[in-house]
Amino acid sequence: MVFLFLSPMKKFGFFLIFLSTFSLAQKFTLKTLLEDKISIRALELYDGKVWYSGTESKFGYVELKNPQDKKQIILSEKKLQFRTLAQDKRSFYAINIESPAYFFKIDKKTLKYEIVFEDNAKAAFYDTFHFVNENLAFAFSDTDDQHLKLAKFEKGAWSFFQNSVRLNNGEAAFAASNTNIASTKNYLWIATGGKSSRILRLNFKTQKFEVFNTPFIQGESSQGIYSIDFLNDQFGIAVGGDYTKQDANINNIATTNDGGKTWEIQASGKNAGYTTCVKIKPGSKGKEIIAVGDKHISYSEDFGNTWKKISDEKGLFVCEWIDTKSIVFAGKDRIIKLSFE
């Protein structure tokens, strides 16, 4: 049996308590941290704050403990759309979708910003920006010649990473949650989608890519992997589906135990449907995983084999664990915090 309790706390949003037989998520609260006219698909956590980039050239933060402490700046008068956000020790970085693509660097202390790199290719459309470590980052873009296009930031310098990977016809990526790249010390994984949905794995030691096919739903431009997360060099999870058929739940979740070489479909026909972001719970060794899509928040307690929809919240696209008992979500017009009790 499910019970929902709503409290009209306008100042901080609302609280929702969910009771079920689901062992961990038997009770939780949802707290609204930010409301604004914005679409947010990229988050970073730093200094007790949730940092975000979004539509209308907006970039800002809201404090987790005191949501009244917030700040927002406009990075450009051009009303750019940002779907990426990344950070190193001193700065945040954001890239707008569409061409020309401007790479913004924002100082964490002063919030002063500058454009440090540009991509003027007609097909420029940056789906993901990911830091491997303090000295290395990659940004993944659509391409006009079917070659894998990665902008590389290494030791303070920008360039395009030379590689021999060719994408299949209709193979691209989704700027759904800034999470179709994942990495460990040894590997970088990139998930593609569309008419072909594959895993591209860069070996940092050899500086070469390996390409692996997946059994994921694919074949149409709206289908494929939207988000990946890896625990270590072996275990990873991929989620996605078809954004034009959000209730469809066939072949839209898969796991790997060999570093992305092979993938096993999980919970096909038995999950909440189209999913845009997946995150492994810290300290759970891959056993516990949160996932979110436009119409649901879902949870797995068995390495992604089975899933329980724990909320019907709509319009959320991206999530990030704050700690082992709380998660921040963002999407259409809001940022919220979920806390397990």
Image (cartoon, grey):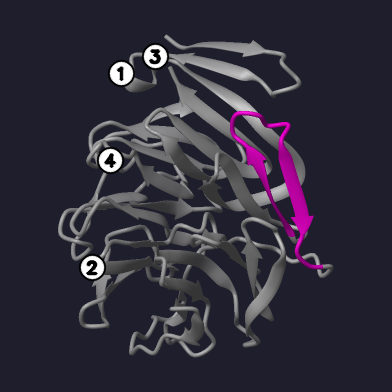
Q: Is residue 312 visible?
A: no
Relative placement, left or right, of 47 versus 165 is right
Please give the range of residues in magenta: 58-76
Cα–Cα gap, marks 2 and 1: 35 Å
Mark 3: few/some/many CA within 10 Å (<14, 14-19, 20+):
few
Name the element at disc 3: loop
Whichever of labels 4 and 1 marks the residue nearer the N terminus, that label is 1
- Report, in whole angstroms, how far the alpha carbon at label 3 lies from the one at label 2: 40 Å
Give amino acid for label 4: Gly
Q: Quick one: SS at disc 4?
A: loop
Asked whether 67 falls inside the magenta stretch, the response is yes
> Label 1: which residue?
23
Q: Look at the numbered discs 2 and 1 and tell me whether their residues touch, using CB distance below 8 Å.
A: no
Quarter residue 99 falls in: bottom right
The residue labelled by disc 4 is 304
2 or 1: mark nearer the eye: 2
Question: Could you tell me the amino acid type at mark 2?
Answer: Asn
Callout 4: 10 Å neighbours few (<14), some, many (20+)?
many
Total of numbered circles in the picture?
A: 4
Q: Which residue is mark 3?
A: 20
Horizontal side of residue 302 vs 242, given as left or right: left
Q: Is residue 222 above or below residue 46?
A: below
Q: Earlier in the sequence, mark 2 or mark 1?
A: 1
Q: Where is mark 2, residue-wise?
A: 186
Report, in whole angstroms, how far the alpha carbon at label 3 lies from the one at label 1.
8 Å
Separation of marks 4 and 1 at Cα, in angstroms: 15 Å
Q: Nearer the viewer, residue 140 or 282?
A: 282
